[in-house]
Amino acid sequence: MQALLVFLSIAALSLLASSRALDPGRFPALARLAASGFLFVLLGIFLGPSVAGVLTERHLEAMRPVMALGLGTAGVLLGLNLEPRLLRLLPRSVYLSGLAHSGTAFFFVALPLLVPLVFTSARGLLGAVGAAAMLGAAASLSSGHSAVLAWRAGRLDRARGLGVALLTMLDDAVGLGVLALALIIGAASNVGEGLGLVCLALLLGVMCGALLAFLTHSLKDLAELTTVTLGGVVLVSGAAAYLRVSPLLAGVACGATLAVVGGRTSERVARALGRVERPVFLVLVFLVGCAVHARDYWAWVLMPAFVGLRFLGKMLGAGSRGGWRSRRSCCHPGWATR
């Protein structure tokens, strides 16, 4: 009964977010909050164990496979966003620009927040360093996935879409690399065990990506392609949850493998997976809200600090890209459109 109430609440909020009642012209701020999924986070906090208690800790533990599915879906989409053919054409200055943009946000978040985490973390210095690195990795990521899809579909101006897509790819690559490093440091009792867990997640993702590329290579029907794609995402997410490794990293390895060996099939898989991306994302952010401890005052202090430091780091990182703009004349005029 409680699970039914939760899913009915999510469905009602989804209908409200897509209805004309939230007209962006009349309520721009509320419409923007609904589109970003923040209302679902608030609903999760309200129904979670720390406020209304509709969902208890036992219910959240039973929902771990759903959380793993959401993280695996996000990981596969991130991996598919990496365009190996395009990344190979980039000059070194572009990589340095992307590293400066995302690396600045990482250091602006990780270093200042490390100090309070050392004093409040129950896992000691190693756990605090891992938590700070994870927050820095989250800060370095960009939310340009919709622009990548629009660029692939031709709905966005080629120059602008290509620029946003490149920036997103480079930010995602840096952020995921830092996330893997943070998991190596803080996901296990020692660094060697953490490295083994990360390698296991990547190996699992590569195997599932190769299998998915083989299964979808000759499929022409969209319904069959969508079904097989969802099955592959469920496989990599479920296997990662069973082995207690990161579903996000396993999904990234799966999507990147499919992007490398899948050829044109990877684009059709990305479009098929885009059909279920929004519902999975909303359920995922709802579960994230349920896991928030509303009575943990340190978390409420940490949240605005994270947002402010990330914004400052992104702005300064974007300013540091001015050197690349002044050096772009050294690139071949058609390097980005080949």
Image (cartoon, rainbow, N blue to C red):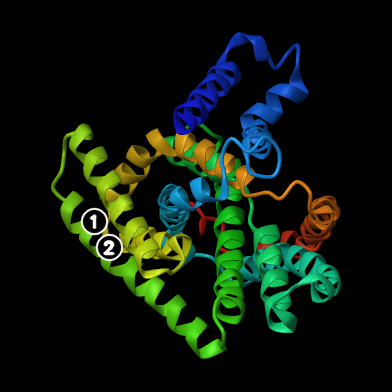
For marks 1 and 2, give the CA distance.
6 Å
Looking at the picture, how far across and down is residue 128, in whole percent?
73, 75
Q: Residue at x 24, y 56 (%)?
A: 212
Looking at the picture, how far across and down is residue 101, in whole percent?
72, 62
Please state which of residues 202 and 114 is positioned toward the viewer in this rendering: 114
Which quadrant, please, contains the C terminus?
bottom left
At label 1, counting other C-alpha atoms closer than 10 Å, the crowd grade (few under 14, some 14-19, many 20 or more) is: many
User: Does dot 1 land on a helix, a strand or a loop?
Assistant: helix
Residue 276's place in the image compared with 293, above or below, is above
Quadrant of the rendered structure where residue 328 is?
Answer: bottom right
Which quadrant, please, contains the N terminus?
top left
User: Does dot 2 land on a helix, a strand or a loop?
Assistant: helix
Res 338 seen here: no
Residue highlighted by disc 2:
208
Say which amino acid is labelled 2.
Answer: Cys
Please state which of residues 323 and 328 is positioned toward the viewer in this rendering: 323
Q: Are marks 1 and 2 in contact (CB under 8 Å)?
A: yes
Say which amino acid is labelled 1.
Answer: Leu
Give the label on residue 212, or none: 1
Res 125 seen here: yes
Looking at the picture, how far across and down is residue 309, in whole percent?
84, 58
Quadrant of the rendered structure where residue 176 is?
Answer: bottom right
Quadrant of the rendered structure where residue 140 is?
Answer: bottom right
Position of 168 compared to 69: left or right? right
